[in-house]
Amino acid sequence: MPDVLPTVSFCATNLNTVDRLPASLSSITALGESLQVPFEIVVVDGPSDDGASEWLAKVAAAEPRLKVVRQGEKNRGRGRRLAFEVSRGRWVIPFDTSLVYDATYASILARYFALGLPKMLFSEIVALPRDSIEAAGSWRDLIGGEDIDLYSRVVARFGVVAYPTGAASSQSASLGSYARQMRYIRGGRFARLRRIYAVQRDQIIGSHATVSDLMAFNGSKPVGRRLALRSFFTLAAIGARLSPIRHAELGRNNYVIVREGLFESFLAGDWKLVSGGGPPPKLPLTQDEIRFLALRSAVYRERREDLTPFLVPK
């Protein structure tokens, strides 16, 4: 029997999420089956020590659509790239093994696939054409900011179809950034600080952010907290300049590139191509994000009134 290439590849990295992993993979399997096309699930498992590796091995032995790849390092960007390289689908859907995804997003994905565009889909789940990922250079070895590093390159080159629904049932509660990083760390206080520093360094590289950008995102913090953050961000920015991985040369902050791509897609009405007659998109923004965009985004400043129906406070 000839090998049937999958149409869709769900790709993820995993480390120490055995408490969330079964529900997440179950939801991805249900989503894939709802699409009614050949699909595969590729999980790159880091050096998990909470039972996740053993659980994945057991499930993969009984589920041919699941491929598990071992990675000895705690590097999300490298894991993302490895999962992509092992996968074979025309469409790649990165997912988070700590989240549960609603199968109703299959209809949005199916309409997006039918368009056959090189653009990325941005909803509560993201999808990208394999060709666009390859043309943009894939994920890089960043332990923080790895997704925005790639997504900004794809959006700048090909654009985005944006349809975040804002539905409360779209995903399970996400792990906070600190809680997530603690799953990567086994050790004392110094090990935790070293990991958090490295993540911030790579987030600066991935987002092409300045210390000023980062401070603008923390404008609501108390004065003492802001002073401490400025020192920390400055040290991380020095580390970013010394890193062999350089930021993508796109001319500005990559977060702004992605957000402006979403805004332009909203204004162009691209969401109507994938909504199936559903309600307009809703993009949650924090007050710090709004403050930052007012400072850095010309599209947000110039079209704020037109964008207001699509933006909701978070």
Image (spheres, helix red, strand yellow):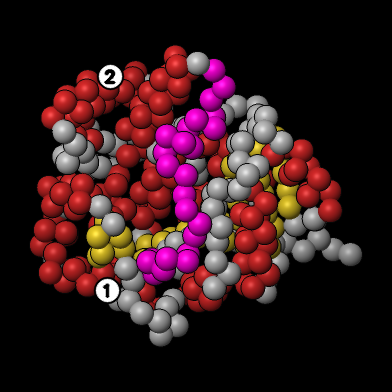
Residue displayed at 54% across by 53% down: 99
Q: Of all residues shown, which one is farthest toward the right?
A: 1
Labels 2 & 1 near each other (Cβ < 8 A): no
Q: Give how far across and how far down residue 199 sits, in percent.
A: 41, 29
Q: In this figure, which residue is indicated by the disc labeled 1?
A: 268
Q: Of all residues shown, which one is farthest toward the bottom?
A: 277
Q: Secondary structure at mark 2?
A: helix
Q: Residues within 10 Å of mark 1 (few under 14, many from 20)?
A: few
* Camera-side residue of 180 and 3: 180
Instruction: Inspect the magenta stretch and tell me whether residue 215 lies in it.
Output: no
* Camera-side residue of 279 and 1: 279
Can residue 40 be seen here? The reply is yes
Q: Amino acid at mark 1?
A: Ala
Q: Which residues are magenta?
A: 163-187
Q: CA distance from mark 2 to mark 1?
A: 41 Å
Q: Give how far across and how far down residue 233 sits, in percent.
A: 26, 26
Q: Amino acid at mark 2?
A: Leu
